[in-house]
Amino acid sequence: MVTMHPWAIAAVVLAVVILGILGWFARRRPTEHQDVRWVANAGYLTTLRSYRSRLSRYRTALGFMGVLLLGATVLTGVLAARPVERDLRAEEMAYRDIVLCLDVSGSMIEYDTEIAEKFLTMLPEFDGERIALSIWNSTSRTVFPLTDDYDLVEAELTEAAEALDFDIYSPVDNLNSAKVDRLIRFITGTEGGSGDASSLIGDGLASCALNFDEADTERSRTIILAGDNEVFGEGVFSLDEAVDMVNERDISLHGIYAPTNNPRQAEEEAEYRDAVERHGGLFHHVDDPDAVPQIIDEISAQQAVDLDATPEVIVTDTPERYFSILVVLLVLYQLGVWRLRS
């Protein structure tokens, strides 16, 4: 928001008006007869069309010059009023880290685009936080590390949403080499483990916890985990072990669950829910419209408790645009004066 001292504008305009009046009276002096040159039979000149036309243009030019001078005066007042932008910035925002932790196994592909789009809807709520994205299946890959470059975050999440928009059961998608290549490029690095293991949620969550740096700094740390808990094979960490490790590192955990169509779905969902909620995290289904706002509110509330900082007002001088316009007006004014005198 741009603010300034409005009284300075009025003061500058008043000063220019006073100087103009004083200058007008100072320049006026009685006309002496010897300074006048009388011309006989010249009275008809004022009735000529050419004379009236030139006089009209002259008066119009004078009016335009007056407008330019008035504009320059006002802009001078604006600059004297010191226009500044004031931003209210809560210092604690710079100490909030969020890792988006996404399962990209085959059973999750149909949900991953929706989840990536949910992550995108979170961006407008952030202001200074650092965000990272980690994807996993049998192994993990960091798509981008913790950063507050939101243009990069938006671009990468958009790429994730588009690359993962793939139906593995559709012949059309499977025969589209461009879509297949794009998907493979994105998930490369998540299938480096045993060939018969996939969706190792414990290992994926543990890897996401390792994305947090600055361990000695007081920061608010959160993982948003998205998966279906449909585990195949043995991992280094079970889900409970990974959750305990996350809790020991003072990392908050929130879960987004994607249902599967297998006989163990109810058991997998219950295990996932219990693990997330055991240390106070929020659990949501992928199609829950309240998932994003509730998670954001919870992160913000936890942030307020963990890092109670006084908001700081950032003041930045912004004279550039006003100064540029003032220069243009003064140049036009000088050109107009030269043209009138000529």
Image (cartoon, helix red, strand yellow):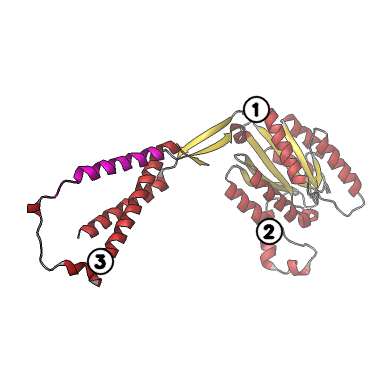
Residue position for label 1: 308
Residue position for label 3: 54
Tell me which amino acid carries mark 3: Arg
Q: Residue at x 23, y 69 (%)?
A: 47
Magenta stretch: helix, strand or loop mostly: helix
Residue 285 appears left or right of 311: right
Residue 139 appears left or right of 265: left
Q: Residue at x 26, y 67 (%)?
A: 52
Tell me which amino acid carries mark 1: Asp
> Where is residue 91, by image quadrant?
top right
**3D distance between C-alphas at marks 3 and 2:** 70 Å
Q: Earlier in the sequence, mark 1 or mark 2?
A: 2
Disc number lying in front (1 or 3): 3
Q: Please provide percent x and percent y for residue 259.
A: 85, 51
Up the image or down, 206 lies above or below 329; here it is: above
Observer able to see residue 269: yes
Q: Please provide percent x and percent y for residue 75.
A: 38, 46
**Closer to the camera in the image, 28 or 115:** 28
SS state under label 3: helix
SS state under label 1: loop
> Crowdedness of circle 1 by 10 Å Cα count: few (<14), some, many (20+)?
few
Asked whether 134 falls inside the magenta stretch, the response is no
Q: Which mark is residue 163?
A: 2
* Residue extent of the magenta highlight: 10-31
**3D distance between C-alphas at marks 1 and 2:** 40 Å
**Closer to the camera in the image, 284 or 83:** 83
**3D distance between C-alphas at marks 1 and 3:** 72 Å
Disc number lying in front (1 or 2): 1
